[in-house]
């Protein structure tokens, strides 16, 4: 007997795409408009699968369970970047503050640098996109000296030298 709840194709799409995002944010597609959008989001809210958070919706533990998944646990040693001195870390680099590229530069300009996983969590990008942004945008286009080292655990650590 199948114990998973019945989902409409649209509900399943929204929940599965939110589960693939690091922050669990539910982003309805542009093609879902008007009453259909309201109806789908209301149904998900009523069942407790999503909850409002700062102007958008995020997936709850019940939402992960509805699609047969568990909420991913962030690995130990991974902390979110503070934004207190981020503008100082962007000085002299022609990058708009608040963008994913700015988050990448801020993480790389910290004294300890950033691992590939930290850069992926900061930007929401896949590993190949992070490496491509480092080599293409930062090294080639902006001319920054990005140094690659390895930490004691064998992870790649990038920093701007």
Image: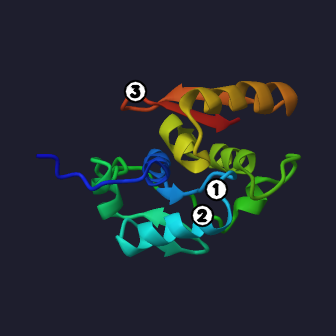
Residue 70: horizontal and vertical position, in percent? Answer: 28, 51
- Distance from label 2 to label 1 (Cα)? 5 Å
First-in-chain label (2 vs 1):
1
Q: Is residue 99 left or right of residue 57?
A: right
First-in-chain label (1 vs 3):
1
Q: In percent of the image, x 48 and y 64: which residue is there?
A: 58
User: Which numbered disc covers residue 100?
Assistant: none
Number of marks? 3
The crowd level at tag 3 (other Cα within 10 Å; few <14, some 14-19, many 20+) is few
Image quadrant holding the C terminus, namely top right
Note whether residue 80 is visible. no
Q: Nearer the viewer, mark 1 or mark 3?
A: 1
Judging by the rendered image, the residue that carries numbered circle 2 is 37
- Distance from label 1 to label 3 (Cα)? 44 Å
Q: Is residue 140 above or below residue 80?
A: above
The crowd level at tag 2 (other Cα within 10 Å; few <14, some 14-19, many 20+) is some
Q: Are marks 2 and 1 in contact (CB under 8 Å)?
A: yes
Judging by the rendered image, the residue that carries numbered circle 1 is 32
Q: In percent of the image, x 38 and y 32: which residue is there?
A: 152
Q: Nearer the viewer, mark 3 or mark 2?
A: 2
Seen from the viewer's position, the closer of residues 121 and 65 is 65
Secondary structure under the numbered disc 3 in the rendered image = loop
First-in-chain label (3 vs 2):
2
Residue 18: horizontal and vertical position, in percent? Answer: 48, 52
Residue 22: horizontal and vertical position, in percent? Answer: 48, 50
Tell me the quarter of the picture where residue 131 sits: top right
Judging by the rendered image, the residue that carries numbered circle 3 is 154
Residue 160: horizontal and vertical position, in percent? Answer: 70, 37
């Amino acid at each position: 007997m199948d114990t998973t709840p019945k989902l409409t194709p649209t509900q399943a799409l929204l929940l599965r795409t939110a589960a693939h995002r690091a922050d669990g944010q539910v982003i309805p597609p542009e093609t879902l408009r008007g009453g259909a959008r309201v109806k789908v989001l209301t149904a998900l809210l009523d069942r407790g699968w999503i909850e409002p958070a700062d102007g958008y919706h995020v997936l709850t533990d019940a939402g992960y369970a509805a699609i047969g998944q568990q909420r991913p646990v962030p690995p130990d040693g991974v902390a979110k970047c503070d934004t207190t001195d981020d503008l100082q870390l962007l000085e002299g680099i022609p990058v708009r503050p608040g963008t994913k590229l700015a988050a990448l530069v801020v993480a790389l300009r910290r004294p300890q640098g950033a691992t590939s996983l930290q850069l992926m969590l900061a930007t929401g990008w896949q590993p190949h996109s992070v490496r491509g942004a480092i080599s293409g945008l930062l090294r080639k286009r902006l001319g920054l000296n990005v140094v690659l080292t390895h930490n004691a655990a064998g992870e790649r650590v990038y920093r701007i030298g």
